[in-house]
Amino acid sequence: MAIKAEHLNYVYGLGTAFEQCALKDVNLEINDGEFVGLIGHTGSGKSTLIQHLNGLMKATDGAIYYNGRNIYDAGYNLRALRSKVGLVFQYPEHQLFEINVFTDVCFGPKNQGLSRQDAEKRAREALTMVGLDESFYARSPFELSGGQKRRVAIAGVLAMKPEVLILDEPTAGLDPRGRDEILDQIAQLHKERNMTIILVSHSMEDIARYVDRILVMNHGEKVFDDTPKEVFKHYKELEAIGLAAPKITYVVHSLRDHGVPVDDNITTVEEARDEILRLLEK
Amino acid sequence: MLKDITLGQYYPVDSKLHRLDPRTKLFGTMVFIISLFIANDIWAYLIATFFLISSIRLSQVPFKFMVRGLKAIVFLLLISVSFNLFLTPGEPIFRLGFLKLTREGVKIASFMGVRLIYLVVGSSIMTLTTTPNQLTDGLEKSLGFLKKVGVPVHEVSMMMSIALRFIPILVEETDKIMKAQMARGADFETGNLIQKAKNMIPLLVPLFISAFRRATDLAMAMEARCYRGGEGRTKMKPLRYGKQDGIAYLVCLVYLAAIAGLRIMG
Ligand SMILES: Nc1ncnc2c1ncn2[C@@H]1O[C@H](COP(=O)(O)OP(=O)(O)OP(=O)(O)O)[C@@H](O)[C@H]1O
Ligand SMILES: [Mg+2]
């Protein structure tokens, strides 16, 4: 088990007139090699939660264990933790600062204390992973397109070779093609390197296609924690908290309401197609 | 610490003081400050205390927020009080080496201490009950007469309110970028001064870029909405005096007269 959070509570602006409870008694476990989706409406506490997982924010109350050790223990090396639990922020392109793409990606590995050669090797690998070739290396990060900047920023975290990769809405503001490319690359990382991945998103469609498990947040509380199939069965409750199951769930359920015996475990369009074809052939 | 600037220290409740016109509150604060410098005997200070406590009660702001501002001046307070206490010449009560405590010293020092504390608490009441934007509005209106002598009052106050509007945004941005770089292993705490300054680059570059981007965006948006300075510009929420403002002015003037009267008679 990689990450475990127990009774996490977090209050913004503690002791001021603007106290705001952002996390309420959140318990969760992330296992090694899992691909987990974290979903919730705007302001439900997703970003707050993931910043706890690599020790950037300290919980008002509760504990977090990484590989069995409490990260709030005195003497726990938080910097080392941050290089093991890589976090890509929402709009990560705002963090770029170097004169060219390549040096920017080297920033992380250099901070880990790697030699120049090793850092550059890591940067090259990471940039290849996100699909940027050598022609980009010498360009200024500020003259790239939004999607390209996003990739550079993701590469900047990948170059640190984290064991767990957390991405906060990596596809926000990208066009459908850019979105699919980035999500596919993440899925590939998961498959090839067996990296543990936590993907934060607004979109059930995106998440349903890739993840093994979905955590649903609502007003700072974790309300569901199960496989996509199980979570989507609660599509009525999901609607009540401002989310929705993937469109195909609705199609499947209304087919069943009309007496068509489709399997209600379907979560993607492809599965639905196969199921409907199977029924038609019968 | 940066967070403290973001909202001024505005405390959001709906009290009688919150609803007063900012100009009235500016006037009241000024009256109170002046009164503190006129007051020189115990009765005047008692009246001032009564005035202050009534304002605090009226503002509905918890007392601990009032005294928060005092933390900043603890040091100043200690120094000025102890200097006055031991270095005022007069009739000695107590001697310790070359230091001597005099009756006059005790009197001056305690007045001095009370005066400083009241000053801070008094001005806190204004900032706690008035948003920074109301404050600049109030200042713009009250200082409007300076326009006649060529002071660009509107422009200055517009700049002030934009700056105030941007502080929380930039603070948030700083926080975000700082965390993003820390997630990449950046270290903002350790090292000597030069090292620390160097480590700030990953924070400052993105921050400047975003500040410039926001500034040009805002300028563009203002231009697109035909902003041309204060000439002939009307306000969505014009400042208007109400009945309660009249009462407040009256109370302030009576208070000032009482303190001044005590000074003249004493
Ligand atoms: N710096 C802050 N100060 C005070 N309150 C905050 C701060 N950041 C977030 N909050 C509050 O905490 C709650 C959770 O915010 P968070 O950013 O975790 O939401 P989110 O689920 O990531 O939303 P989004 O999908 O919009 O990114 C919100 O109600 C928000 O208003
Ligand atoms: Mg978020």
Image (spheres, coloured by chain):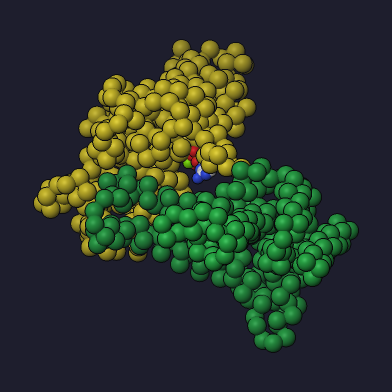
Chain colours: A yellow, B green
What percent of the width, then of the height, locates residue A177?
40, 46
What percent of the width, then of the height, locates residue B49?
72, 52
Name the residue rendered at 32%, 58% in the picture. Answer: B200
Q: Quadrant of residue B231?
A: bottom right
Name the residue rendered at 45%, 28% in the picture. Answer: A61
Name the residue rendered at 68%, 54% in the picture. Answer: B125
Q: Is residue B97 visible?
A: yes
A256 lies left or right of B259: left
Q: Nearer the viewer, residue B80 or B232?
A: B80
Residue sticking out furthest to the bottom: B149
Query: Quadrant of the image for the N terminus of chain A?
Result: top left
Q: Quadrant of residue A56?
A: top left
With respect to residue A234, does B169 lie above or below? below
With respect to residue B163, does A162 lie above or below? above
Q: Quadrant of residue A167?
A: top left
Q: Is residue A167 visible?
A: no
A98 lies left or right of B4: left
What percent of the width, then of the height, locates residue A37?
41, 30
With respect to residue A130, does A62 lie above or below? above
What percent of the width, then of the height, locates residue A174?
44, 49
